[in-house]
Amino acid sequence: MLKAKDADEYIAKQRAAIRKNPECGTSHYNLAVALLGLKKYDEAETHLFEAVECSPSLAEAYVALGGICLQREDLDGCLKYNKMAVKARPGFSEGYGNIGFVELQRGNIDEAIKALEKATVFNFRYVQAFANLANAYLIKGRLEDSIETNLKALKLQPTFAPAHNNLAIAYLEKGDYHLAIEHCDQAVELGYEVAPEILKEIDTHR
């Protein structure tokens, strides 16, 4: 994380680069990222629009625009920009991960699975995408797929609490109570707020 003084220096450097070459999409993008760090969303958005105008294939800028939309609770906007990101760069895992997340929020589970499977194929270290995909499988009742995907997430990051929570639910539904208890306890230990009804059901099997 940039300290305030460092951030100011970095921003000044990017502004100077833009003055020198206003058509450089990367400089606009770099400036926008620094401004986002300072929560200056409106100015960051302006520079992100400049970035994609100068460099239409700058997928990261579309993802950042999607992030600003999410900040404003605009799921439609977030989805739109992430779709533009994967169009600009097919195989851009972060864009697919975000599309999957939004579709999951909207209850479009099949669309979410499609996008999240792509995200995890293009980036096999994308922990959050694995966890969201496992969650989508769980909703569809695909317990084995959900368990396998959560275990992949934990292989990448053993302390990733949402995966432990998802595993507790999946094992509970499967009737593997010993494993359900084990993962529920780990989720709680890691500070995850497990749903009260899950905790209650887990306790009946201790």
Image (cartoon, rainbow, N blue to C red):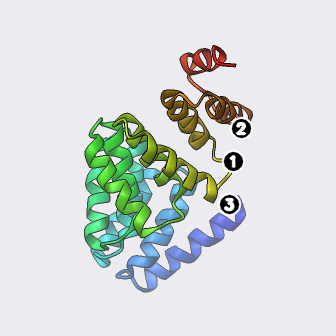
Q: Are marks 2 and 3 in contact (CB under 8 Å)?
A: no
Comes first in the chain, label 2 or label 3? 3
Comes first in the chain, label 1 or label 3? 3
Q: Give the labeled residue for mark 1.
A: 159
Circle on res. 104: none
Q: Image quarter for residue 186?
A: top right
- Residue depicted at x 34% and y 82%: 23
Q: Amino acid at mark 1?
A: Thr
Secondary structure state at the residue bearing disc 3: loop
Distance from disc 1 to disc 2, alpha carbons, whole Å, reads 7 Å
Q: Quick one: 140 or 177, which is closer to the camera?
A: 177
Quadrant the N terminus occupies: bottom right
Q: Are marks 1 and 2 in contact (CB under 8 Å)?
A: yes
Q: Amino acid at mark 3?
A: Met
Q: Quick one: 47 or 144, which is closer to the camera?
A: 144
Q: Amino acid at mark 2?
A: Leu
- Residue depicted at x 63% and y 13%: 204
